[in-house]
Image (cartoon, grey):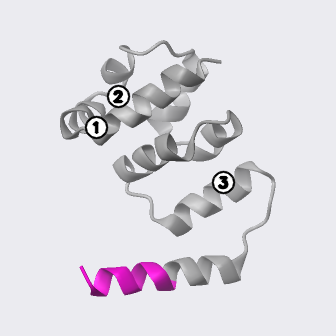
Amino acid sequence: MSRYGIEKACYDLADEWNSSAFKQDPGDYLSRYPLEPAEREEIEAGDVGALYLRDVSAGALSELMRVFDYDMADYVVRLRRAAGMSDDQDQLRILRERAQGRKRFS
């Protein structure tokens, strides 16, 4: 596993040019980083759950989450499922309510 490569590829998505390049051609964008094929596939698919299990930092996952336009509830569901946990409906309801509150003040 090349956790550094995964994190570098994801953190670099914070730059608008890089996120545009990723959206246009993920394979080409990811070819710049030392990644194994499975890691490349997980990033291309936006599989934050699988990357979480690889111990990728939350900051790197949040950049990937932003590019794939996941909200916090989607993110939490993906992490819980990757960890073999069932969905916590109360937690998801709270996250969705908070997201709605933020949208009203944007």
Q: Does the magenta stretch include residue 100?
A: yes
Q: x%, y% of residue 95?
A: 54, 77
* Label 3: which secondary element: helix
Residue numbers of the magenta segment: 97-106
- Which numbered dot is residue 26? 2
Residue 41 seen in this snapshot: yes
Q: Name the residue under label 1.
A: 23
Q: Which amino acid does label 1 sit on?
A: Lys
Q: In this view, does 79 lie to the left or right of 84?
A: left
Residue 47 versus residue 54 in the image, above or below: below
Residue 40 seen in this snapshot: no
Q: Nearer the viewer, residue 100 or 55?
A: 55
Q: Name the residue under label 3.
A: 79
Q: Dot 1 surroundings within 10 Å: few (below 14), some, or many (20 or more)?
A: some
Cα gap from disc 1 to disc 2, whole angstroms: 6 Å
The residue that appears at 63% across and 46% down in the rendered structure is 49
